[in-house]
């Protein structure tokens, strides 16, 4: 046994890393199989149900977003129409107020 500086063996670093990686993968797979509460068929069924639920939820959100966009579009259209009507009324009112002044200026 040596004391002092650590000296690594050359060329074995990659092999050691791969070996420990494979041991870890095997241990993880064994633990997963030993602790899995459901069979593969049950797990796939639950996974499909989860996928279907997520898909339905996403479709619901999409429909709700479309409805909100449609409602917002209608509100914007209503506001634009009211703005156009107000602009027309303002133009008419301005003409009514300015017309007497224009006549007075033209008479002189």
Image: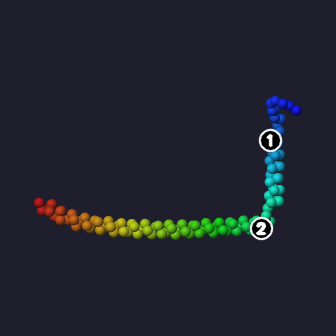
Residue at left 54%, top 66%? Answer: 65
Task: Write down the residue under mark 1.
Answer: 14
Outermost residue on the front side: it is 3
Considering the image in quadrants, where does the N terminus appear? top right
Residue toward you, 36 or 83: 36
Q: Quadrant of the rendered structure where residue 3 is?
A: top right
The local secondary structure at tag 2 comes to helix
Q: CA distance from mark 2 to mark 1?
A: 39 Å
Above or below for 56 versus 34: below
Task: Write down the residue under mark 2.
Answer: 42
The local secondary structure at tag 1 comes to helix
Labels 2 and 1: the sequence-earlier one: 1
Residue at left 46%, top 67%? Answer: 73
Callout 1 crowding tier (Cα within 10 Å): few <14, some 14–19, many ≥20? few
Above or below for 19 versus 107: above
Determine whether, in the image, residue 84 is placed left or right of residue 63: left
Q: Position of residue 15 (x, y in %)?
A: 82, 42
Determine whether, in the image, residue 70 is placed left or right of residue 14: left
Residue at left 75%, top 66%? Answer: 44
Callout 2 crowding tier (Cα within 10 Å): few <14, some 14–19, many ≥20? few
Q: Quadrant of the rendered structure where residue 55 is?
A: bottom right
The reply to whether residue 40 is visible in this rendering is no
Residue toward you, 36 or 52: 36
The disc label shown at residue 53, or none: none
Considering the image in quadrants, where does the C terminus appear? bottom left
The reply to whether residue 72 is visible in this rendering is yes
Determine whether, in the image, residue 104 is placed left or right of residue 22: left
Determine whether, in the image, residue 72 is placed left or right of residue 35: left
Q: Position of residue 90 (x, y in %)?
A: 29, 66
Residue at left 80%, top 50%? Answer: 24
Judged by depth in the image, the label closer to the viewer, 2 or 1, is 2
């Amino acid at each position: 046994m040596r004391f002092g500086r650590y000296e690594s063996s050359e060329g074995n670093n990659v092999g050691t890393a791969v070996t420990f990686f494979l041991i870890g993968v095997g241990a993880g797979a064994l633990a997963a199989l030993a602790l899995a509460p459901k069979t593969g068929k049950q797990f796939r069924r639950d996974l499909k149900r989860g996928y279907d639920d997520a898909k339905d939820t996403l479709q619901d959100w999409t429909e709700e977003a479309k409805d909100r966009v449609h409602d917002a579009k209608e509100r914007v259209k209503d506001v634009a129409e009211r703005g156009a009507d107000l602009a027309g009324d303002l133009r008419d009112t301005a003409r009514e107020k300015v017309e007497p002044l224009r006549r007075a200026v033209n008479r002189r």
